[in-house]
Image (cartoon, rainbow, N blue to C red):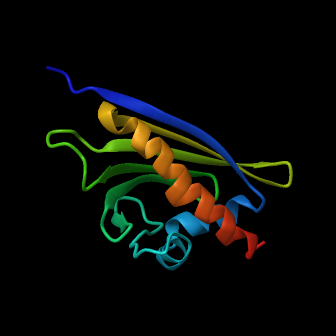
Amino acid sequence: MPLKVGTIEQTVFFKTTPAKVYEALLDAKKHSEFTGSPASTNDRVGVEFTAWDGYISGRNLELVKNKKIVQEWETTEWPKGYPRSRLEITLTPRNGGTELKLVQTGVPAGQVEEYTGGWHSAYWEPLTEYLKGRK
């Protein structure tokens, strides 16, 4: 029986440069600062990473500096037998800031709603606050 999966699509705007958003997501120190939780994120393709003190794990598949992040991604709550999801983030300069588009495919269907809200509460809201002090 095929695994039931869903897709999360979000667009968020930050009042800063794509470089600052890219850095905050991939620099372990900055990522830990804005989430308030340990991370081993990095900007190297093929390298495994963790975020939220190991709750999230994955691997960088493709990185285009300040423009695009493609990763395999899962959490410790991932159902047994499901492969990692594919997370693609694109950063576009727009209206003096950055438009971030997220598309996450292959998310276990029963977790789509939880992770959709989680992106906002655990990432976009704290990142917005963090970036306010780093224009």
Q: Is residue 69 visible?
A: no
Is residue 30 positioned above or below 86 on the image? below
Which residue appears at 74% of the width and 70% of the height?
A: 132
| Residue 101: quarter of image | top right
Q: Residue 120: image x %, image y %?
A: 55, 51
Which residue appears at 59% of the width and 68% of the height?
A: 23
Q: Residue 92: image x %, image y %?
A: 71, 47
Quarter occupied by the N terminus: top left
Q: Nearer the viewer, residue 110 or 70?
A: 110
Which residue is situated farthest in the top direction here?
1
Side (left or right) of 96 relative to 30: right
Side (left or right) of 83 relative to 15: left
In this figure, what is the number of numbered marks?
Answer: 0
Q: Nearer the viewer, residue 60 or 109?
A: 109
Is residue 18 positioned above or below 8 on the image? below
Q: Residue 131: image x %, image y %?
A: 69, 69
Q: Nearer the viewer, residue 89 or 111?
A: 111
Which residue appears at 49% of the width and 45% of the height?
A: 117
Which residue is situated farthest in the right direction here?
95
Is residue 128 positioned above or below 72 on the image? below
Is residue 83 positioned above or below 18 on the image? above
Q: Is residue 25 visible?
A: yes
Q: Residue 3: image x %, image y %?
A: 22, 27
Quarter occupied by the C terminus: bottom right
